[in-house]
Image: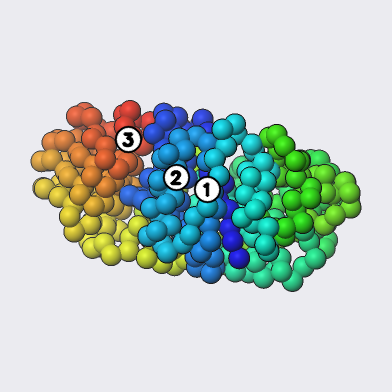
Amino acid sequence: MKAMVLCAGLGTRLRPLTNHWPKPAMPLLGQPLFRYTLATLKAAGITDIGINTHHLPKVMQRVAREECTRAGCTLTVVHESEIQGTGGGIRGLRDFLSDGPFLVVNGDVLFAADFRPFIAAHLASKADATMVLLPMPAGEKFNPVELDATGCVRRIAGKGPGGAKLSPWHFCGVHVMSPAIFDFIAPSGPTDINHDTYLSMLAQGRTVGSFTVTGQKTYWSDLGTPSRYGATHQDLLFGQVPMEVFGESSPFHGLVATGVRTWVHPSAQLSDAKVTGPAWFGEGAKLGAHVRIGAATSIGRGAVVPDGVALNRVSVLDGVRVPKVPLLEDCIVGPDGPTAYI
């Protein structure tokens, strides 16, 4: 089976960080988000990967090639000079994907899950597509995907044929599709797979199925805003994310654990830093004298913290030098300086 990772989004809500990285290439504990996605695909036996690019295409393609080489995967890339939406992105890889059922995964989420049950459920069904769904997160306002008693999709974001006693679910950004889907994607122009293609299929009486993830230990997070990035970063450090599916692609793999959930790469230089933890120090990270590291803080690969700086609930991204200020809290420190977790 092959997979497509959607990588063409603009990342407007994460600016200015996404002036430097497309969202799937954003560092998260010293490695691109794309590495986590690739690990879940490879754990499901998928090694033929396709991506689409638009925003910062050279950066996205470089990261994807490096990560696929690292993981022993093949990579097919299609570039969109004009962004084509999720449906148009899938259409752009039709030649690559048309030889059998395939997965499509949003590249800007962290989803720790075993993908094999999703695949098996789709192959056992007669659906043209299967949407992977989660219980609706408490306090969130995501557009619901509504199912009938048989698990078939009947409404998406309030649109569709509807029916009696529908149950609302949250779409996690993973689909399993059969090549028949290409008969329903608009032949040209920007188009959305959920709001255009699937609704058109439902109107024609076709089946869009579902797999509801309720029985396995999973973690899902959309990293599309600074606040969600910050929450995900903290969940990783506090052990709220099941890391088994990521295997050797876990950011904790091979690091020396010390103190209270504190991981240190052998090449990191901590000087005389006082570390509360949980904390993570990447390859080549360098701390000056009298630095204080509070809870839920990570220092990315090659990042530098000057003398006397205190950090608390901070993610310092790869290669960044922290500004020399007394205290930084609740922020991501990127190439343009701190971005608050709001």
User: What's the residue at 27%, 56% (across, down)?
Assistant: 262
Q: How is the image coloured?
A: rainbow
User: What's the residue at 11%, 48% (across, down)?
Assistant: 271
Q: CA distance from mark 3 to mark 2?
A: 24 Å
Picture coordinates of residue 324, whole percent (x, y): 19, 29
Q: Earlier in the sequence, mark 3 or mark 2?
A: 2
Give the label, 3 or 2, closer to the camera. 2
- Tell me the amino acid under the disc marked 2: Gln
Task: Give 36 or 143, whichever is nearer the viewer.
Answer: 36
The N terminus sits in image quarter? bottom right
Q: CA distance from mark 2 to mark 1?
A: 7 Å
Picture coordinates of residue 117, whole percent (x, y): 63, 69
User: To which residue does mark 1 refer?
Assistant: 77
SS at mark 3 in the image: strand
- Give the quarter of the image for residue 251: bottom left
Q: CA distance from mark 3 to mark 1?
A: 30 Å
Picture coordinates of residue 218, whole percent (x, y): 54, 61
Question: Which disc number belongs to residue 61?
Answer: 2
- Tell me the amino acid under the disc marked 3: Val
Q: Earlier in the sequence, mark 2 or mark 1?
A: 2
User: What's the residue at 68%, 43% (across, down)?
Assistant: 87
Question: Which disc number belongs to residue 333?
Answer: 3
**Residues tagged 2 and 1 counted as in contact (Cβ below 8 A):** yes
User: What's the residue at 80%, 65% (across, down)?
Assistant: 126
Residue 296 in sight? yes
- Tell me the amino acid under the disc marked 1: Val
Question: Which disc number belongs to residue 196?
Answer: none
